[in-house]
Image (tube, grey):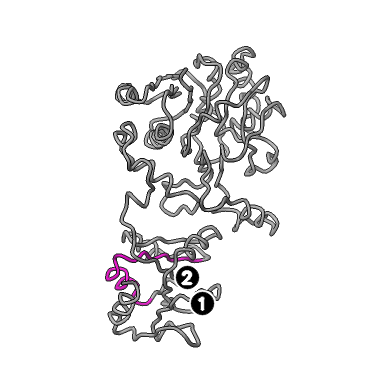
Amino acid sequence: MKKAIVLGADNGYLNKLETTIKSVCTHNRNLKFYIFNDNLPSEWFQVMNRRLKVIDSEIVNVKISNHQLEGYHLPSAYLSYATFFKYFIADFVVEEEALYLNSDIVVTHSLDELFQEELGDYWIAGVRDYFVKGYENRFNSGMMLINVSKWRQENLSAKLIELTNKHHQEVFGDQGILNMVFGENWKKLDRKYNFMVGLDSLIHIAVEATPEALSSWYNSALPDDVLPYIIHYTGEKPWLHMSQNRYRDIWWFYQGLDCSDILLRKERVFQTYQDLTVIPKAYTAIFTNSCELEQVEYLIENLPDVHFSILAHTWVASNIIDLMRYPNVTVYQQYNRFSYDKVMKKLDFYLDINYHDEIDDITNVVMNMRKPVFSFSNTNHCNEGAQVFSPTDPDKMVQEIRKYID
């Protein structure tokens, strides 16, 4: 029997929906997708059905255009009324169980193990939500293994609509309503099935965040060699150009895959985002609290095989953001510990080229890592140990860096 997988989307989210579907199909076959929508074109479904036959799968167009969902209050700007489509799952899905996924999710493993979970009399199986105040012990509704037969028997869709009509202004969207109905009658799953990264770019700047909360969040990170089965990009989305949430490159990997690569199981499907792009010869970084970086564009242009990471504790000026027009530049504004660790693990050398104060004692940190520091005479923050050059002759610095990385 085919595994039933349900998603809801509107036309504005179509490319995100496709990314989720591609990620599922990369690691699974024998699938039946139900796409709840009110404005997706029929031609898209026809094309997708032709493609999915190759992996013994199909896609169903569940069209619900006569609804009141757009009138419901949404707690966050990034949410769409399409999130309420999940209310109608039992009215259209014929299987006894189904996996519901938001369209800001990617799947990185086989789902066989998840579908073997026994639901018994539970409404769903899900993962605790840690991101909504007051909902710490409740589930996140972006991923649910659903007991469709129970939903059907209880005529759940009518009950959910009735409660939403009454409470949509005061609860956290569909998630608040579903938790209100299900209470404690849901099965708790390991967080690998809904690994949420929404607080990555928020918790370190949140006014109410305590040191304990910060420590707990950062310590919740998985080891580098362990990938969650299902990654949920709550909060800032990976397709936003300044997002810092973890696993951003994973989303772009699946977004960048061609459907033919996936369906024909080509070798590149089992590689990584880095294999789809140019791999830098070396990595450098600049930590700054200033928008003035000596000769930065000259260095970027003359070291095209070096990746430059620019990190700041604050929002950055437009001239720094505009450096991202170069393919070898990433800017981290209001950077968090995950971004810091990611950059420092790859660092080959440091560029001490920012004007004004040094931040985070970074040159000493780099020297303790036994990595070289390259600086200009008018930006040097090191008492000793750095290789210092004249700002009027940046090519000498480029030549020395080239010697080092070659």
Q: On the rendered structure, is 50 left or right of 63?
A: left
Q: Quadrant of the C terminus?
A: bottom left
**Is residue 12 among the parts visible in the rendering?**
no
At 37% from the left edge and 46% from the top edge, which residue is drawn?
271
Circle 1 residues within 10 Å: few <14, some 14–19, many ≥20 = some
State the image coordinates of residue 130 (x, y, percent, origin top left). Answer: 64, 43
Of residues 290 and 103, the one drawn nearer to the viewer in this rendering: 103
Task: Report if residue 160 lies within the magenta region.
Answer: no
**Region in magenta:** 294-312
State the image coordinates of residue 405 (x, y, percent, origin top left). Answer: 34, 72
Number of marks in picture: 2
State the image coordinates of residue 185 (x, y, percent, origin top left). Answer: 70, 26
The residue that disc 2 covers is 287
Extreme residue toward the front, this view: 267
The tag earlier along the polypeptide, 1 or 2, is 2
Toward which corner of the image does residue 281 lie, by quadrant?
bottom left
Eyeballing the image, is 8 above or below 253? Answer: above
The residue that disc 1 covers is 358
State the image coordinates of residue 57 (x, y, percent, origin top left). Answer: 39, 22
Disc 2 is placed on an element classified as strand
At 29% from the left edge and 82% from the top edge, which residue is drawn?
396
Of residues 389 and 290, the one drawn nearer to the viewer in this rendering: 389
Disc 1 is placed on an element classified as loop
Circle 2 residues within 10 Å: few <14, some 14–19, many ≥20 = many
Q: Amino acid at mark 2?
A: Phe
